[in-house]
Image (cartoon, grey):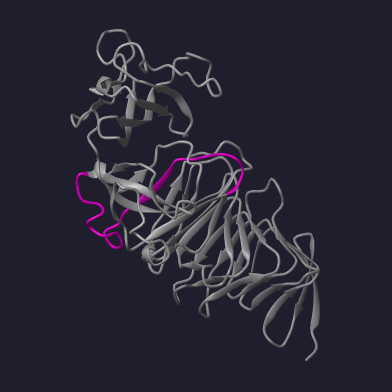
Amino acid sequence: MKNKKIYIRFLGTLLFFSLNSIGQTVNQGVFTNIGVSGSVAEINNLASGTLTNDGDLYVYNHYNNDGVVTFTTGTTTGMTRMRGLLGSQNISGSNAMQWFDCEFDNNLVQPAFHLSNEVSVSGTADFFQGIVDNDNFGGLMVFENGANHFNVDDDSFVDGFVRKNGDEVFRFPIGDGSQYRYASISEPNTTTDAFTGKYFFEDSNVLYPHTNVDSNITLIDNAEYWTIEKTAGNSNVFLTLTWDEDTTPTAIYTTPYEEIHIVRWDVTLNKWVDEGGIADASTKEVTTVINPLTDYGVFTLARVRILLPCNGNGVVVHNLVSANDDTFNDVFTIDGIEECPNNRVEIYNRWGVKVFETTAYNSVGNVFKGFSDARATYKDKEKLPDGTYFYFVEITDEATDSTSKFSGYILLN
């Protein structure tokens, strides 16, 4: 049977469709949706087609794009609803799809959505139900600047690569198999920055031997790992990874939590290196505070040996700084650090920007009093706003020729 072209005037917009014998809804002209429309048949937007969705578009079958799929710049009403009626849904084509809002709602089969194309979201993605699998199909999920997501859980996430463009804090909605296991980044500096994340529910030892480690690393997570890549830009970020009883070995997340760090596979050194970390048992998160995190790639959780610097006596960190000249907590105090003058102290704000740095830190003159010395971000000696900051301390013990690194929170009030 020959294709039959149908010309429809829909809410003042001329639509060009073709229906053929294999059950496709084919757009080969201009289709602008400003109301509610949908297709039970597969939607195929040809190379000559432009499909602009500024309304509600219900997709009950496969969705292929070889032309232009977009929304009108400035509108916030475009919603693409992927709702399967017949099983899994292919999201395919040779040209990326640009959606504003989208909804994934298909509980017929897992993974529900086979993504072999690139989908760019500028508004909000609702992961109501159904896993988006691009790992096995070669696609990519992109969140533009200002975009976000909700309803992500073990039954609905992206199994594969997710890229975030922009200068915002972002939690990657990633997982593997039937496990949602996010990673988060702090705010990059500019809207042109981009980072890409993926989670692997696999033993990293197969590709990245756990016998090749920094001397202070005692145990590496052998069940999972993440890849975080800097895709574009020059920013460096804090990285947060998570642990979960369903995936993470118990030996990794036991007390003391200070021993839980993030480690990275260093391609040049061919070994796992310690990137530090602050573990929060209430959220099951571990965040790096070493900045700049100049190298990216493969990351996972590990336990490390906390060395006692300063001739084995150790140091004690006081993490409250009031800076009001009342003689109580006026400076960031590290008891015992004078015994190891070969030290370096760095302090960062919650965006990962360094606000203080010094060597030979002590408890008298060379101290942090709540003022910045990072002229690239604040005026020299400008008082910093109240809030939570991160500290990073590195001490070289000359007696044992060993280096200790540790980090934590500072509350500036």
Location of the C terminus by quadrant is top left
Is residue 248 on the magenta stretch?
yes
Q: Vertical placement of 401 versus 222: above or below?
A: above
Task: State the residue in front, 55 or 244.
Answer: 244
Where residue 204 appears, x then y in whole percent? 39, 63
Main SS of residues in magenta: loop
The residue at the point 39 percent across, 41 percent down is: 288
- In the displayed structure, 320 sits above or below 58; it is above
- Residue range of the region highlighted in magenta in the rendering: 231-256
For the residue pair 327 and 63, the one nearer the viewer reads as 327
From what the image shows, is residue 364 above or below residue 1?
above
Which quarter of the image is occupied by the N terminus?
Answer: bottom right
Image side of residue 51 versus residue 144, left or right: right
Query: Residue 177 versus residue 53: which sits nearer the camera?
Result: 177
Count the labels in the image.
0
Q: Is residue 290 visible?
A: yes
Is 362 displayed left or right of 183 in the figure? left
In-front residue for pair 87/396? 396
User: Residue 39: horizontal and vertical position, in percent?
Assistant: 64, 73
* Quadrant position of residue 391: top left
Q: Is residue 307 above or below residue 369?
A: below
